[in-house]
Structures are given as structure tokens and as C-alpha cells.
Image: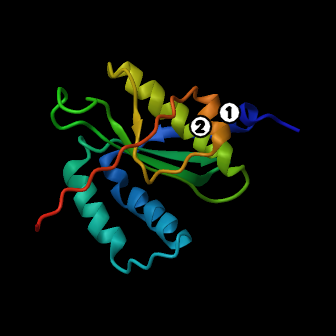
Amino acid sequence: MPSLGEDASRVRVRRVTQEETFLLAALHLQALRRHGVAAPDHVQRMGAAWHERADDFPAWVAECEEDHVGMALCRLPVLPHLGTGSPELVALEPLGSGVAPEAVALALVRTVVTWGGREGFRAVDVAPWVQLPAAVLDAARADVLGQRRVSLPTRP
């Protein structure tokens, strides 16, 4: 039985170009549907929005044996000296079949982390709503920190 790393090595991950705007949006729609979210015009709306801001939201697609099996999307820090100054992984979705979801997630995480290092970032933060399997966190040597959530009311 192959290891998680061996399975992940079967997955090819590449950066999404602006010419592939609707591929990214269609993969994200698949993820939304898998989570039970109906979004009738999502491909057009997300495609248009991402196309305009692609430089601020780098994205990747995972492929295995000619199939699209996942996608990842990061948000770059707007003001690098505020907050952590790190890019934030805001979407990571293993999709399709033929390869284990954990292997797709690991391949995407490794690619995003490698990209972040090449870009000079010390880390890539993971948005609180992005769920990564424990095996992927272990393989990526992730620092899992407790999260503090503060809500500021707009009315007394």
C-alpha cells in the first residue's frame, strides 16, 4: 500500500493562469456543491472577480491522470507589516476521484508552501474555515495554534 507521500507524488499541481479563470471558478463551484451550497451563477461571478484580482489571489489546480482533482486559493497580505504579513490559504478542495483526497491536499499544500518560501514569506497561514486532514498537517510540519476569535459589536 503506497504512503501518503507516494500518492501525493502522483498529483501534478500547477498555477492557474488568467486564461483559466473559468476552470478555477468551475472547480470552486464543484466544491460548493459538495458542501451542499447552491450557487447558480457562481462560475460567472467568481470568474469575473478572480480575473480582476488574480495577482492578489494566487491559485493552483491539481491534476492526476488528465483529471482535475483539486484546487487551492491564497490571499496575499494587503499591507505586509500588519498582522502576520503572510499569505492566507483561503480555499483548498480535493475533488474528483482516482487519488485519495489527503494525497491531493498534501500535493496542494506542498506546492503552496514552496511558492510562499520562494516569494520570501516565512509561513502561509490557513484560514479558520479551511479544514486540512491531520496527516497533511503532520506531513507539512504545521504549527497548529489555538485561535482567538474576537467580535466587535456595531451596536451597544
Q: Is the residue 24 above or below the residue 111 in the image?
A: below
Residue 47 image point, x, y percent: 30, 62
Residue 96 image point, x, y percent: 63, 59
Residue 129 image point, x, y percent: 44, 54
Q: Earlier in the sequence, mark 2 or mark 1?
A: 1
Which numbered circle lies on residue 63? Answer: none
Residue 119, by quadrant, is: top left
In the picture, measured across the screen, residue 92 lies left or right of residue 69, that is left
Q: Residue furthest right?
A: 1
Residue sitting nearer the eye, 121 or 6: 121
Q: Amino acid at mark 1?
A: Ser
Callout 2: SS? helix
Residue 52 image point, x, y percent: 19, 53
Residue at 25 percent of width and 54 percent of height: 51
Q: The C terminus is located in which quarter?
A: bottom left
Label 1 Cα neighbours within 10 Å, binned few <14 / some 14-19 / many ≥20? some
Q: Amino acid at mark 2?
A: Ala
Callout 1: SS? helix
Residue at 30 percent of width and 48 percent of height: 18
Residue 155, by quadrant, is: bottom left
Q: CA distance from mark 2 to mark 1?
A: 7 Å
Residue at 50 percent of width and 32 percent of height: 111
Q: Is the residue 60 above or below the residue 41 in the image?
A: above
Residue sitting nearer the eye, 36 or 115: 36
Q: Which residue carries the number 1 mark?
A: 9
Q: Which residue carries the number 2 mark?
A: 107
Q: Is the residue 138 above or below the residue 152 in the image?
A: above
Q: CB atoms at circles 2 and 1 under 8 Å apart?
A: yes
Q: Is the residue 20 above or below the residue 105 in the image?
A: below
Q: The N terminus is located in which quarter?
A: top right
Q: Residue furthest front?
A: 156
Label 2 Cα neighbours within 10 Å, binned few <14 / some 14-19 / many ≥20? many
